[in-house]
Amino acid sequence: MKVLDILVRHNMTLDRLAAAVDFYCGLLAAPVELDLDLLDGRLRVAQVGKMVLVGYHPQIASAISMAGAVYLVRDIESFRTALSAQGCETLEALTDVVTGKVMVMKHPDGLVVEYVEHLDAVRTTGSGERR
């Protein structure tokens, strides 16, 4: 088991997302690597460098994970078992999503982490279409 990458996650309302994406593209000198438009436009996820920017419609705010980090992993099932054995609390059960599998765990120190196992080829164009 190994964490492949750690990303900072930042949630905001949809009306703030475009400005945030522009800001981080400039600050990090990085392109948009992932751009997903989900739930009929009520949820949008963009990755710029090591930032995952999550824009949501206020109507779905209560369903948005408040994780502060995203850990990219392989074999998420093994992580679920090991984390549970180490006293982590499952906040959101392992679920299949458009990009692969995801779960949200609360570490014993209180850090809330979204664990993600991507499908082999999860990268999109700026229009939200898969490459």
Image (cartoon, grey):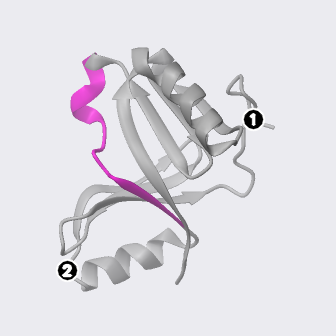
Start and end of the magenta stretch?
59-72
* Residue at (42% x, 27% y) in the render: 55
**Number of numbered discs visible in the structure rendering:** 2
Q: Is residue 48 above or below residue 125?
A: below
Furthest residue in direction front, as rendered: 27
Verify whether residue 36 appears in magenta.
no
Front position in the image: 108 or 120: 108
Q: Nearer the viewer, residue 29 or 42?
A: 29
Locate residue 12, reporting x and y percent: 35, 29
Q: Which amino acid does label 1 sit on?
A: Arg
Q: Does residue 62 show up magenta in the picture?
A: yes
Label 2 secondary element: loop
Which mark is on residue 87?
2
Residue 107 vertical placement versus 44 (above, below): below
Task: Give yes or no for contact between labels 2 and 1 (Cβ–Cβ under 8 Å).
Answer: no
Q: Is residue 77 left or right of residue 11?
A: right
**Quarter of the image where the C terminus is located:** top right
The image's mark for residue 12 is: none
Please state which amino acid type lies under the numbered disc 2.
Answer: Gly
Q: Name the residue under label 1.
A: 130
Q: Residue at x 69, y 42 (%)?
A: 29
